[in-house]
Amino acid sequence: MTVPDRSSTATAAPEIEDLLRQLAPQVLASLARRNGQFDACEDAVQEALLAASQQWPEAGVPDNPRGWLITVASRRLLDQMRGDAARQRRETAAIALMPPEAWQVPAPDAVEVAEHEDDALTLLFMCCHPALSPASQLALTLRAVGGLTTAQIASAFLVPDTTMAQRVSRAKASIRTAGARFEMPPEAERADRLRVVLHVLYLIFNEGYTASSGDDLQRPELAAEAIRITRDVHRRLPEAAELAGLLALMLLTDARRPARTRPDGSLVPLAEQDRSRWDPAAIREGVDLITATLPLGRIGPYQLQAAIAAIHDEAASPEDTDWPQILSLYRLLEQVSPNPMITLNHAVAAAMVNGPEAGLRMLASLETDERIAQHHRLEAVRAHLLEMAGERDAARAAYRLAARRTTSLPERRYLEDRAARLTS
């Protein structure tokens, strides 16, 4: 069955669209818990959202919009299961003529609210099912949990709508093939599945904070959605220290977003940012969160990264940054979660404390690492450290190589500008 994407025909006001995005995962979770068949439920909910986006602007938002959507989606699901196309057309026409009050259902009681809390978390775990590829996990999480349309997700990742629709469709088919049921994973698997959930949310945030390709450096809507979902999960799992660390990391990083670009969209590096433009409320929340979380138990990579971000955010100026403490944290982080991106940042901290030669020596270990050897960030960091060391010609060449390798237009322009400054 082909489900119409509500973004293509909806005429709803922004506040109604926001409400539908908020309600979409709640309705899907409720339907999936009661009926199973995640893929069929997701299709039915999309049709109910489309109906709401067409009706509510004229007829008004029902007193119980969530109940309205559950009722309509349930009827759509029943039609799908019966395979009665003619009946579906008749009911679709009838729905379009019925006022919102005809669909009123009782407001959820305390038991249903509690069920909803569990449902939303179960939905997120299902979207991050191990049978799915990372790309499918991202797409399905943004659609089912984030409430974004297929067109919005496609736009965020700069792929055609049809490509993203196929990705979502394959993800739902994989869940069905894997025999996944709408239930929390067994206790023995829950910690591993939560790590996957955190990784997916981290990837969504990173793509929003620094877009991997395209004309814009940032996609704030993706970063905001990652923060919203992570905050919601943290409210349900307050004892999960790494989850709190991830939320703190997002807040402390996103706090700098207003100062990361100039009016023309060009990149402003951390050392040159106007710190008065950083978001003080986000910094306070992030610092308070990581301060409360670090003493609770085993320290993980998100907590350590949040602690590093807090040191940067609390420094009144670049000169006030406590680089020795940052270097110590990166040493620990590389032990806890060794990966080339951590080593790259570790090299910068080493250079700031012990001189650029120390950082350049660390970069040598990455030149044969196929995960990063051809990545533009390796050459960008090398160029920065060479510039610090006064090796202008080598730095200029490294900046130019990094510029050729990046697919982000703002980053390319920044790197080319750095190279131009070093022209003799």
Image: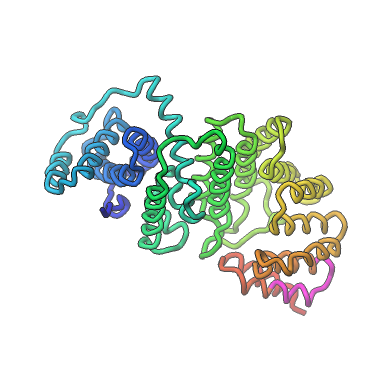
Residue at figure coordinates x 46%, y 54% from the top left: 136
The residue lying toward the viewer, choosing from 66 and 271, is 66
Residue 11 colored magenta? no
Is residue 188 found left or right of 305 in the rendered image? left
The correct choice, above or below, for 424 with respect to 238 in the image is: below
Rendered location of residue 46, percent (x, y): 31, 46
Is residue 67 found left or right of 184 in the rendered image? left
Image quarter where the C terminus lies is: bottom right
Residue at figure coordinates x 34%, y 38% from the top left: 36
Which coloring applies here? rainbow
Is residue 192 found left or right of 401 in the rendered image? left
The correct choice, above or below, for 141 with respect to 352 in the image is: above
The correct choice, above or below, for 134 with respect to 276 in the image is: below
Magenta residues (range): 388-399
Residue at figure coordinates x 82%, y 59% from the top left: 351
Residue at figure coordinates x 60%, y 68% from the top left: 406
Rendered location of residue 228, percent (x, y): 51, 40
Rendered location of residue 164, percent (x, y): 40, 59
Q: Main secondary structure of the magenta part?
A: helix
The residue lying toward the viewer, choosing from 393 and 105, is 105
Rendered location of residue 357, percent (x, y): 86, 64
The residue lying toward the viewer, choosing from 248 and 244, is 244
| Image quadrant assignment for residue 415 | bottom right
Direction top: furthest residue? 110
| Image quadrant assignment for residue 113 | top left
